[in-house]
Image (spheres, coloured by chain):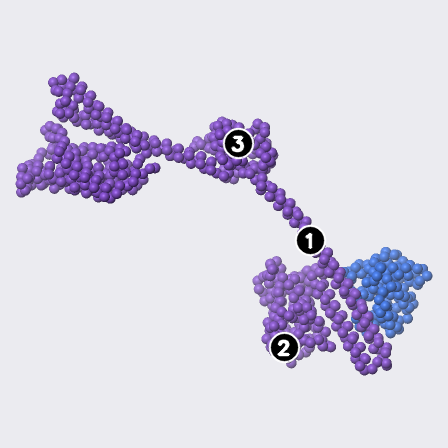
Amino acid sequence: MKETIQKSFSYKTIVSILFGFLGFAVNFWFTAEFAFPPFTAAVLIGLLFPMLITLTWGWKYGLLSALAGGCQSMWWIWGPSNGYAIFLVVPPFTLWVIWHGYWAGWRKKQNACPWWLSAYAVEIPFRILNTINLLTLSRWAITLNPPPWSWAAGAANTIPMPFSTFVAIKQAVVGYVILLLADVLLNLGFVRKFFGLKEEYNQANTSYIISASLLIGGFVWLIDSIISYLVFQPGNSLFDLLALNIPPHDIFMRTLFILACLIGGLLASYLLRGQHERDKALRDNEERLVQIVEGNPIPTFVIGENHTITHWNKACENLTGCSASEMVGTQKQNLPFYSEERAVLADLVMDGAAEKDISRHYTSKFNKSSLVEGAFEVVDFFPELDDKWLIFTAAPLIDHQGKVVGAIETLRDITELKKTEKELKHHTKNLEQLVTARTLELEDTNQELIDFAYTISHDLKAPLRGINQLAGWISSDYADVLDQEGQEKLGLLVSRTKHMHKLIEDILKYSRIGRTAAEKQKVDLNPLVRETIEILAVPENIQISIENELPTVVGVYAHFEQIFQNLLSNAIKFIDKPEGFVKIGCEDNENYWQFNVADNGPGIDEKYFDKIFQMFQTLAPTSEEDESTGIGLTLVKKIVEMHGGRVWLESTVGEGSTFFFTLLKQGARNERK
Amino acid sequence: MRGSNPILLVEDDKVDVMTVQRALKDLNVSNSLDVAGDGEQALTFLRNPDNIKPCVILLDLSMPRMDGIEFLRLAKQDKYLRKIPVVVLTSSREEQDKVDSYDLGVAGYIVKPVNYPEFVEAMKTIDMYWTLSELPPLG
């Protein structure tokens, strides 16, 4: 909507003051006097000017305008005849300005105003108050006349009651006529522009209506004058009857006529405006709907009455290659999709098709749409549309009576998606094959390693055993030819072969973990640890204790046996105190068990914490008696990690070491990745 | 060993053969010892009617040409040979070897001890057991 620029403060101020002066001048130049024998109604037409300002710009400018002229003229004109009573006539006018001005300003801020806050309605309480004033206070003030000031010395000190009533009626009529005139004026386009008011719908047309009403009123005036001159009062001159000396009754009737015409015009213009606003809103809605459909990136078309296409959007043009101009208004919606004559999904949905009807038309997948009652969704292949795959949905369009009046169909090209899906399937299959091939390769490699270990086991052990035995036999068979030194050297040779044999056995043991066919089972660690301790032949100065109840875990029995055997034998072997102890404990840590094996041995320097878990790493020098190969802790680490746990230690040199390891509980996720 | 039938040692390693011979001598076992270098030789020896059937076969598993498991498979299919008890005498601790051996009906599985005195102990046990244990007629 176009809006005229709000008039500036100074413009409003100047216009308000000018209108005040104008009213003042008009009142002195021409006071309309209507004869209602025995009374005469004097109307101060000039008051219209400040009142118009009030109704247009609110009470502040109205008051300014009234003070500038309108009010003063009342003092001047009515003051002498009213005496004291003028103090009770002018202030109500000021009240009118503030009261109406306030509501006019309020209405301006609102978009819609209820009828009971219109100027005509808020006039009622003012008018009641004013009437009471006229009939009571004003009459009382008149009894105090004459006042001491000279210009009102002639004011009457008594007036008849009918005159008061007459004045009240006159003021009420004039009040409403002024409101009506203001309304008429403010409906005219140029007046609105002059006051800087918001342009209204169809403003020009309503101006014509009101002007025409006024013209008709004037025309009736003329006709009435002529008829009176020719028929009812042939003795009077035409000019007397027209303007100069109109009989009171005629002037009343004609004024009434003109007012009636104006009221009619005003009503007509309001109705016209309302109608236009509704039409425009409708057109806006329609326009918006077209834009929504048109600008939608999803191909969409709509069919209406008789299955005729009403909308065919840009995206639909692009998809089908058929333009809206050739499709809209026709019933050939099947043309872009099928070579034969048949109904499309929108047609079926519009005819209220049931699932079985749909399945007759579409062999491929279709679903009832969950979004709209009566809608369906179909995925199909269209050879006629360059081999496209489409997913399309049709929903019925329903009028306010619940009658199906059309259908909307949206289509999406999923050809690329289908292609990608196919490729993905292909790739997945390839990947599976690749994984299978790689797994086989890995299994082969693994088998090769197992075979290799097996070969080592036999091929290295057999000659070693040979050397060992031959050396032994030489030592015994040739005892008399060998001297002491020769015997010792042969002894060293034998012990070295034994050590090497143990090394080979340990490597085999290590490689055997994880590929044993042994089944996992529930293992109660309490008897297991007790048995392990018994086997170990613990020296008497060392106490081995189980600190708390050990859990039952799942795994290979021999593996757990190896863990405890290695940890305990290490502890026992290195204990250097006269009273040694080894303590075994376990904590429940929600997802896993945490075990600890603590001793009071010599302890291990922190810098060796990682090294001791590496293969063949021993901290003690190799001695004749010591058969350790440095594989025990490596073995423990491998077993623990195979069970999803980890192993570490804490130690203080000279005081002892505590080895910790965790075992994942059955069903818990691996803590390390 | 029970009776006077010889013992058949199927073994390719010369030192191991010497070890067995020496152990038997040290244990004063009177039975004679026949030696076959591999499975094939052993089968040929056993199927030769001129040779006396052994009272017990000491079998190495890892051998050239025909290994111990293969020999066992064939020997146990042969109705004349399958009654002869076979004791596996090997370096292998492999579980699979043990399983295969017992599947094929061996009478014992002994891992060769690395030093001689233990070896002698093992042989002594074998001798004692097969002295005590009754044997079927071997034909």
Instruction: Report the Cα–Cα distance between label 2 and label 3.
Output: 92 Å
Q: State the residue position of label 1.
A: A438
Where, quadrant-wise, is the N terminus of chain A in this rendering? top left
Q: Chain of mark 1?
A: A
Q: Residue furthest right?
A: B50
Q: Earlier in the sequence, mark 2 or mark 3?
A: 3
Q: Which chain is blue?
A: B
Q: Give the image location of residue A284, x and y in percent.
A: 39, 35
Instruction: Report the Cα–Cα distance between label 1 and label 2.
Output: 49 Å
Q: State the residue position of label 2.
A: A602
Q: Give the image location of residue A131, x and y in percent.
A: 16, 37
Q: State the residue position of label 3.
A: A322
Q: Residue furthest bottom?
A: A484
> Looking at the image, which residue is at 89% across and 71% down?
B29
Q: Earlier in the sequence, mark 3 or mark 1?
A: 3
A2 w.r.t. A463: above or below: above
Circle 3 SS class: loop
